[in-house]
Amino acid sequence: MASRVPSYIRTTAKAASAIRRVPITNTAQNASSLKLRPIHIPTDNQGPLGSRPAWGTGAEVPQTVVPVVGGGSSAAEDVAGHQIPQQQPQRALDRLPNRDLLRSIAIQTAMSRPFLMDIASSLLKSNLKVITGNPVLNYLLDNIFYAQFCAGRNEAEVRQTVSGLKAMGYRGAILSYAKEVDTHHNIDQTGTPAEMEALHRKQVAQWLDGTLKTIQYSSSGDLIAIKYSGAGQGTVQLLEQGADIDPVLADALEQICVQAKQNNVRVCVDAEHYSQKKSIDAWTMDLMQRYNTDGETVIYNTYQMYLKDSPATLAMHLQRAKQEGFTLGVKLVRGAYINSDPRQVIFDTKEQTDNAFDEAAHMLATQHIEDHSAPKISLVLASHNKESTNKIRALRQDQIRHGLPLADVVYSQLMGMADELSMSITQSTSEVDEDAQVYKYVVWGSTEECVMYLLRRAEENRDAIERSTASQTALWKELRSRIAF
């Protein structure tokens, strides 16, 4: 008996129209607004990665009518019956070195105690010299926290760290130069116009140098991440004002994109504070239009799905990519600035954020199946949420089983976090998704340059109590397994 085609596949047009029709605040109800109707599934067999049929240019093929899940179904129900195989060739954390395992346990234990993290955060924010000047505190900072989340201070250290990641089964790294500008404080505009222009040029040049080094430190096929704010106070001012890119920054970005393309390295533009979102989106879409051509993906934009307007923004960007004929690079995250972004722009509940993330991921991973005029999409699914990740893995498993073309999807988690999830993907790819690729996001730079990144990791671990508890359980279980043998 022929296997039944999966029942959960939705269409881009339906999902996008649902995003447009349903008020942003009701995103949690989007799934129930989709009705049963047939869609046409091409029966072409999937070729190897890099040789997939071009979306929107294929000839007519035999078609199969597939019911789309109707009203009332949840994202969890969409993958019911399509569970990730539980049989693993080895323990999920089996390839984590002893040193990393013990350090992860120490980090998770410390971060589960809010009073310890409050003290550490206060020291990092107020006076880093207090830590670096104390031998014991400096050792803990460098050999525990910095080593857990940061790749190193120079090319040799970075390459050693990335080689270690690849030895654990990861495809590579999303490498980022850690230097940022603290936009919580007012921008210094006390100098003369000439002095401010000179400062802007200097800061952009420093950022450009760090970013070009990041490309240099990366291997072919890897990704880097950039933050526009790292280019200094003048750039932050442009972002906050909603202004166009000025010639100094435009020249720097062109050098970055050209070098990345030559080195076969992709560039993810990270999200930042909500006040800068409009400018970041506009600048990044213009870069995509210039460089994401001929089926290549050089530039990705980041979409924080805890923001109420992100589903509409994503739908709008899909439409522009379709009209202008370029590849849309999407890095999908839940969000990293919840403690500083205005509360009214964020979904009211975690469930709404989860639904927005899952619906966007589902749409991006399936829209090419029916809509052959849809733009090509490259998706970085950046999530520590096991449920969200497994939904996409199960979806792709069924697509492979039925010979459907796969979207370009890779997975990403932060280095030093969620190793039990990352390694479970790398160890079960042959059973679930034969070309699944996992990248670890990691920053490089001096301790001083990495401070703001380390602060966000501390806050994220402290706030994500449920996930941290699951990670601790997995880490301690792995340690007991090693001691037992």
Image (cartoon, helix red, strand yellow):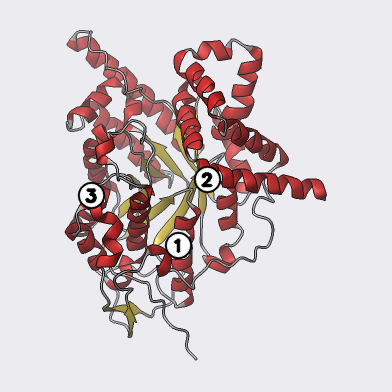
Can residue 219 be seen from the camera position used here? no
**Residue 338 occupies which quadrant of the picture?**
top left
3 and 1 marks in contact (CB < 8 Å): no
Q: Residue 420: horizontal and vertical position, in percent?
A: 60, 50
Residue 414 against residue 233 in the figure, above or below = below
State the residue at coordinates (41%, 74%).
404
| Residue, disc 3 | 313
Q: In the displayed structure, would residue 303 be above or below residue 407?
A: above
Earlier in the chain: of badge 2 and badge 1, it is: 1
- Label 2 is placed on what type of residue? Arg
Q: Nearer the viewer, residue 51 or 346?
A: 346
Q: Residues within 10 Å of mark 3 (few under 14, many from 20)?
A: some
Residue type beneath disc 3: Thr
Taking the image as shown, residue 51 lies to the left or right of residue 203, namely: right
Q: Nearer the viewer, mark 2 or mark 1?
A: 2
Type of amino acid under label 1: Lys
Give the side of residue 103 with respect to residue 292, left or right.
right
Label of residue 467 in the image: 2
In front: mark 3 or mark 2?
2
Residue for badge 1: 391
Q: Residue at x 35, y 22 (%)?
A: 182
SS of the residue at dot 2? helix
The image shows residue 355 at horizontal and vertical percentages of: 35, 56
